[in-house]
Image (cartoon, rainbow, N blue to C red):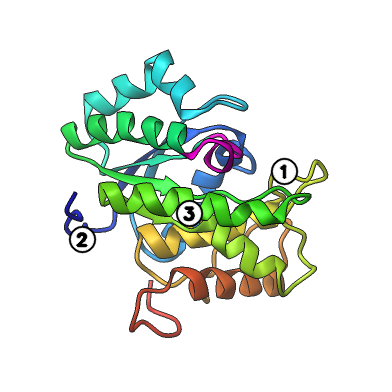
Amino acid sequence: MPARPRAAAPRNVLFIGNSFTARNDLPGLIAALAAAGGKPFRHHLVQAGGASLRAHWNAGHAARLIAAGGFDAVVLQEQSTLPAKNAARFHENVRLFDGAIRAAGAATALYMTWARRGAPEAQAAITAAYTRIGEELGATVVPVGTAWARFLGAHDRPVLHDGDGSHPTLAGSYLAACVFYGTLLKESPVGNGAQVAGLSDEDRALLQKTAWEVCRPPGRKGRTKG
């Protein structure tokens, strides 16, 4: 399937996922970065703890919101281990939503999540599963898991995994938000001044830098104006 044309930065985004999106209010963190960068960003979240995309599809609420229109982009977050355990099932789930998203005139974005702390080797399979379906559908892949792996390979602090070894700490969610900001809003998060209670300026700067190293478009360097 041909790639979709490059779209403008979305202004109104629907997030569909579970606690990996809801924890620490990831959409709100993205919105704070957007506000500090002078970017309009409205968001709506449909989430249920541990839910897969198929569970959301079967429930019907997310599909009805998509069909009602008004969103520029819809972010899909699969149950965290499914892409590695059953990529075919994951791809089926994404295709269901992508058809509805296209019909509503919106763009599909895929929230690539991270491997659990005790199984870092799973990241390669997660990354491959998201990359393959993104290429097939011409959807935007937001490479959060790639950024996590890069950060964890170089730094011990701030800690990204929460105590359960699965969910994100605030720092983990902030890193995810920076990757979304760079990928969807097409601006560097480096130097973004949005304050986050619980994160030091030094931590934010390190997380911003890592995010931009991963999602920076070819030919873009350094900080861009927000």
Kindly identify which numbered label has been placed on residue 136: none
**For the residue marked with disc 3, what is the amino acid?**
Ala
Q: Classify mark 2: helix, strand or loop.
A: loop
Percent x, y for residue 180?
A: 45, 57
Percent x, y for residue 193?
A: 54, 69
Percent x, y for residue 182?
A: 42, 65
Q: How many marks?
A: 3
**Residue 153 placement: quadrant:** bottom right
Q: Which residue is mark 2?
A: 6
In the rendered image, the quadrant that contains the C terminus is: bottom left
**For the residue marked with disc 2, what is the amino acid?**
Arg
Can residue 41 be seen here?
Answer: no
Q: Classify mark 3: helix, strand or loop.
A: helix
Asked whether disc 2 touches disc 1, contact meaning CB atoms under 8 Å apart, the reply is no
Range shown magenta: 79-87
- Decide which of tag 2 and tag 1 comes sooner along the chain: 2
- Decide which of tag 2 and tag 3 comes sooner along the chain: 2
Q: Which residue is mark 3?
A: 128
**Residue 68 placement: quadrant:** top left
Kindly identify which numbered label has been placed on residue 166: 1
**For the residue marked with disc 1, what is the amino acid?**
Ser
Residue 169 left/right relative to 149: right
Percent x, y for residue 72?
A: 25, 44
Q: Classify mark 1: helix, strand or loop.
A: loop
Say above or below: 68 vs 154.
above
- In the image, residue 211 lies in the stretch drawn in magenta: no
Could you tell me which residue is drawn at 78 percent across and 67 percent down?
157
Could you tell me which residue is drawn at 42 percent across and 73 percent down?
216
Say above or below: 153 vs 3.
below
